[in-house]
Amino acid sequence: MAESRPRVWVSQPLFDDLVGRLAAHFDVHATESVTEHSPQAIADALRDSAGALVTLNEKIGAAQIAEASHLRAIANVGVGYNNLDVPALTAAGIVATNTPDVLTETTADFGFALLMATARRITEAERWLREGQWQQWSFSTLLGADLHGSTLGIVGMGRIGQGIARRARGFGMRVLYHNRSRLPDTVERECGASYTGFDDLLGRADHVVLVLPYSPQVHHLIDAVTLAKMKPSATLVNIARGGIVDEVALADALANGRLAAAGLDVYEGEPAVRPELLALRNVVLTPHIASASLATRRAMVALAIDNLIAALGEGPQAGRPPTPVNPEALATTAGITTAKRQGA
Ligand code: 8YV
């Protein structure tokens, strides 16, 4: 009797031609239309799976893997992986992987675009024009804030933060950054960025961009107290995760002149967006698309598939997924892979 192939779950429609590569190794169960999977549906899908290809929509913790005794790998399509309870996966010997690097430049481009749209009121201006409000040219219509010559504060100076800093240099901006740890001198010089404390950055920056990974420690890092430390003329951009910003406090600051404008690509309850934010004219709202160029989204899926195939002990990189987030779990998977090769 032919040996049954390991089952792999694909949680959302991705790119069929790329996902098709999995079929050479696995019994693939792909979700055919965009689906909001309940926590129980995720547990059901993982129960008999050896691996899964998932997006930020699928939250996977101890409850979802409790009965998944064959599960060995979760490949996340995204650099951020706060949808995964990594300690729980590691404890269960499940390898988690993400998709860094391939999205860095695209996401930095978008962060910059959102900053420009916000500071120069581009979407607000277009809405105003389309509404037929442009009856007469006026010198003081829709005055915004300059990027050139201004001070940019980057919170979270990983790969994407550094990409934004490099772009800011080209715009003649002064760049301050705050990060868990200070970057080496060479990187600071290449980015033209100076390290400073969080409060100092908030107080000095004309524009603040959030690009740090989400963890419970940074939940509502931007709240009424930290917003009050920013210049009332400042712009805030968030391309990280919605939970980093207290959206009620932000909407209040924007409505009451304590902050000039905000550009948001991520939201606490996404895809739901707070009515308080929707009602404001001085906020640019985009639907979590910072990495969404066609080439980059394809590259993310391709890398996630490479990770999944390798983490499940198949393909040329068997046992060596390119970008694991918990390499310590590989030891367990390697044992299984070796046993499988020896026909156990
Ligand atoms: C992805 C993102 O679109 O990579 C990330 O962390 O937020 C986005 O680039 C998202 O993760 C898709 O799952």
Image (cartoon, rainbow, N blue to C red):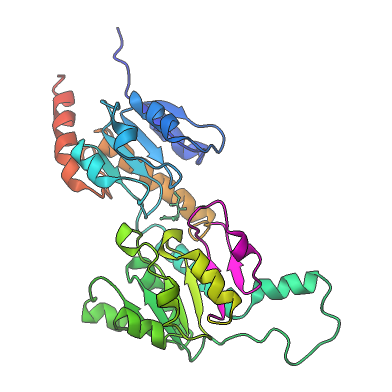
Measured as percent of width and height from the top left, residue 192 is found at 34, 84
Magenta region, residue range: 259-287
**97 shown above or below 233:** above
Measured as percent of width and height from the top left, residue 152 is found at 43, 82
In the displayed structure, does residue 204 sit left or right of residue 339? right
Give the number of marks.
0
In which quadrant will I find the C terminus? Answer: top left
Q: Quick one: 58 or 104, which is closer to the camera?
A: 58
| Dominant SS type (magenta) | loop
> Could one spot residue 116 in this view of the protein?
no
Residue 178 in the magenta stretch? The answer is no
**198 shown above or below 69:** below
Residue with the most extreme top position: 1
Q: Quick one: 281 or 186, which is closer to the camera?
A: 281
The picture quadrant where one finds residue 273 is: bottom right
**281 shown above or below 51:** below
Q: Residue at x 32, y 21 (%)?
A: 5
> Could one spot residue 325 in this view of the protein?
yes
Residue 269 in the magenta stretch? The answer is yes
Q: Residue at x 48, y 58 (%)?
A: 291
In which quadrant will I find the N terminus? Answer: top left
Measured as percent of width and height from the top left, residue 244 is found at 41, 64
Q: Quick one: 35 or 312, which is closer to the camera?
A: 35
In the displayed structure, does residue 46 sit left or right of residue 108? left
Residue with the most extreme right position: 135
Q: Residue at x 18, y 24 (%)?
A: 340
Measured as percent of width and height from the top left, residue 94 is found at 24, 37
